[in-house]
Amino acid sequence: MKVCGIIAEYNPFHNGHLYHMTESRRRSGADYVIVVLSGSFVQRGAPAFIDKYTRAQMALRAGADLVIELPALFSCGSAEDFAGAGVAILDQLGVTDAIAFGTETDNLDFLSAAAGILAEEGEGFSACLQEGLRRGQTYPQARAEALRLGCEKQGIPWEPEQAASPNNILALEYLKVLRRRNSAIRPMAVPRQGEGYHSLNMESPFCSATAVRNLLESAADFPGEAVRTVIPDWEITLLEEEWRQTFPITADDFSSMLAYQLLASRNSGYGNWLDVSEDMSGRILKHVTEYRTFSQWAALLKTRQYTYTRTARCLCHILLGITRELGQRCREEGYGGYARVLGLKKSAGPLLKAVRANSAVPLITRLSGDSRLLGEREQAVLRTELFAAQLYGLVQGQKYPGAKPLPGEYTAGLVVV
């Protein structure tokens, strides 16, 4: 049995994702594909555009055999946390032979060499990184400069455009984590097709998720013909049925909830929340009376050093009550801890049996019973996920009062295709 793993968001699913999944299966020769999928919040520091159960169904209908949830504590975290937790789950399942990730290049040798420099974090690299931060560079800029110098010292041809693109940043993190874990999982780079990560162009059949979200959010009527060329045919019906009924969900839908959390924490400051530095905490306190909406606030707090996305992630951590202590503990203990199944194919019985026999962590298929198998740290991670899902469901119900409520986390069955 050969198994290929993919870490994804599918926010929402489009032709580029279908190409990636098809190519991943073909190149790896996999009998089964496991997708580790972001839950209710995603890595750019925002709620998922479409709920996790619908996106799990999309993944399964597109060819995945098993969908595992990436908990909110990691899914709306930095690239390091997102990749670290996703790879840990795939590694600990004990059946994953390969991991396939999208890149802007097929030069896996360069990415692997660069990831080695990041994994080792030698004194020269760390000193250069800190110097860049002191000069006011953003973390991505400072890291890229430190990485460039590290590559030059080791005689590795520097490819700046390959080190800075969003997909390659994640690819470097996947490779770094595999190296640090001494994992036997084989990495596979699948070059991205079509438009760039942030492109809004809808003319290519391989457009970005950003373009699809923008169209679905802004359209007055369901844009069936416009999206028909960029998403699989079977997805048209699914999206049309749910559009303006259960989605779109955006960050600004959580504005009032975030305002409450900001005010509730005002006296103690915000430095106890994950990734919120003392400097960022001070900026929030300074400007808290200027708060209007989630997106307006993230833009207001943005500086040369703090990108919009990093700021939005900090705000998500405050919104969801994700503490610095729990995040740091998960990093130190190698992430992982459990694998919660969101959905599976009817034909995936042999895969599920193999995971049960080989997994180093509890496999949760029924939350009400299986959660008792978790330790104290894992219970804390799960509580964060449950809170995020309940918050998401509450907002969805307020925005679309006529919609069928999302299933409760303890009563929801698996998505089966």
Image (spheres, rainbow, N blue to C red):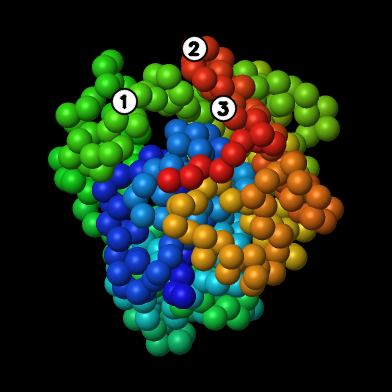
Residue 60 shown left or right of residue 107 in the figure: right
Q: Residue at x 48, y 27 (%)?
A: 250
Tag 1 near tag 3, CB within 8 Å: no
**Is residue 281 toward the left or the right of residue 153 in the image?**
right
On the image, the x and y values in percent for residue 325 come to 79, 51
Q: Which residue is mark 3?
A: 406
Q: Amino acid at mark 2?
A: Gly
Give me the residue at 52% from left, 65% from top.
351
Q: Is residue 122 visible?
A: yes
Q: Amino acid at mark 3?
A: Leu
* Left or right of 98, for residue 262: right
Q: Residues within 10 Å of mark 3 (few under 14, many from 20)?
A: some
SS of the residue under disc 2: loop
Q: Is residue 377 visible?
A: no
Determine which of the numbered discs, if any, sits on residue 240 in the image: 1
Does 260 sit above or below residue 169?
Answer: above
How far is disc 1 from disc 2 in space, using C-alphas? 16 Å
Q: Which residue is mark 2?
A: 402
Q: Which mark is residue 386?
A: none
The secondary structure type at the circle numbered 3 is loop
Residue at image x 56%, y 15%? Answer: 398
Q: Quadrant of residue 41?
A: top right
Label pair 1/2, CB-CB below 8 angstroms = no
Give how far across and how far down residue 71 sits, in percent. Answer: 62, 48
Q: Depth check: give the residue in front, 371 or 272.
A: 371
Percent of width and height locating residue 76: 57, 45
